[in-house]
Image (tube, rainbow, N blue to C red):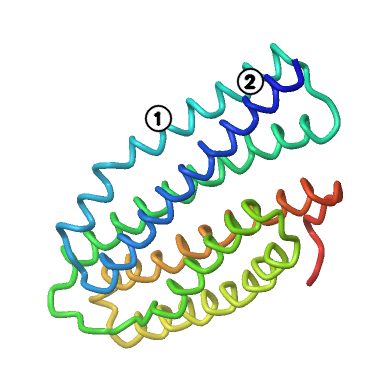
């Protein structure tokens, strides 16, 4: 029974990591859509969101099946619990990439001569790094890499605050561009949420390795 459970857990881990790779790819596509303001790329991201949703449901069902059939305890039970949570966070990250793609579309439609520039390159790079590091920490069972993700989350929050203030200032200068500016700013909010979900994954990895809940701490 133990060997069979080990095989089932290994399959689940591989499926979650494969899902993580797909979500990383979607984030890369989103980076391209934001940087190029490409309507085609944005629509492709929105159109394929269902693929991640379907995979997330299947992984959760597999986890629940293992819980029911094998009734695991200790580290195996902890692994399944955090896998369900990580699985959900990955799906939520994919949702946020779709939300960003929708903002790109609306910003293109509402531009109408508005030419304010919002540089998201640093924020996009940090979000990609956070997602990669959170998944790498799971692959390698590496607490140090997981803690790097938690620290970077504060940097994302600071950039988001700066972007918000820029939007407020720009609307005062050009109120006729308010719809365009709001959509441009909301890309920052969605990126901040991606960072939050990557942080959740890192926190769950720390819990898996050390058995300690680190949410709500300051780093």
Classify mark 1: residues with Cα within 10 Å, few (<14), some (14-19) or many (20+).
Answer: few
Numbered label attached to residue 183:
none
Q: Residue at x 69, y 32 (%)?
A: 80
Q: Is residue 87 left or right of residue 31?
A: right
For residue 66, above or below residue 188: above
Q: Quadrant of the N terminus?
A: top right
User: Residue at left 35%, top 68%?
Assistant: 182
First along the sequence among labels 2 and 1: 1
Mark 2, other Cα within 10 Å: few <14 / some 14–19 / many ≥20: some
> 211 or 124, which lies in front?
211
Location of residue 26 in the rendering, given as x and y in whole percent from the top left corner: 35, 54
Q: Is residue 106 above or below residue 181?
A: above
Q: Secondary structure at mark 2?
A: helix
Picture quadrant where residue 48 is located: top left
- Residue at which label 2 appears: 64
Q: Nearer the viewer, residue 185 or 11?
A: 11
Answer with left or right where residue 23 lies relative to residue 74. left
Relative horizontal placement of residue 146, taking residue 12 as reference (left or right): right
């Amino acid at each position: 029974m133990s060997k069979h459970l080990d095989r089932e857990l290994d399959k689940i881990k591989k499926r979650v990591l494969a899902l993580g790779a797909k979500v990383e790819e979607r984030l890369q596509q989103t980076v391209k859509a934001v940087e190029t303001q490409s309507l085609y790329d944005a629509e492709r991201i929105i159109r394929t969101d269902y693929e991640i949703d379907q995979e997330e449901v299947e992984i959760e069902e597999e986890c629940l099946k293992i819980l029911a059939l094998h009734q695991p305890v200790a580290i195996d039970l902890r692994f399944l619990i955090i896998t369900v949570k990580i699985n959900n966070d990955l799906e939520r990250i994919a949702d946020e990439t779709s939300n960003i793609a929708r903002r790109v579309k609306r910003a293109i439609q509402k531009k109408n001569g508005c030419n304010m520039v919002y540089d998201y390159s640093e924020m996009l790079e940090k979000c990609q790094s956070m997602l990669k590091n959170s998944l790498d920490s799971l692959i390698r069972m590496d607490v140090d890499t997981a803690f790097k993700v938690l620290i970077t989350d504060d940097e994302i929050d600071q950039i988001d605050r700066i972007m918000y203030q820029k939007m407020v200032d720009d609307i005062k200068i050009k109120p006729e561009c308010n719809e365009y500016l709001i959509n441009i700013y909301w890309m920052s909010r969605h990126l901040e949420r991606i960072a939050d979900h990557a942080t959740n994954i890192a926190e769950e990895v720390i819990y898996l390795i050390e058995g300690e809940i680190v949410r709500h701490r300051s780093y």
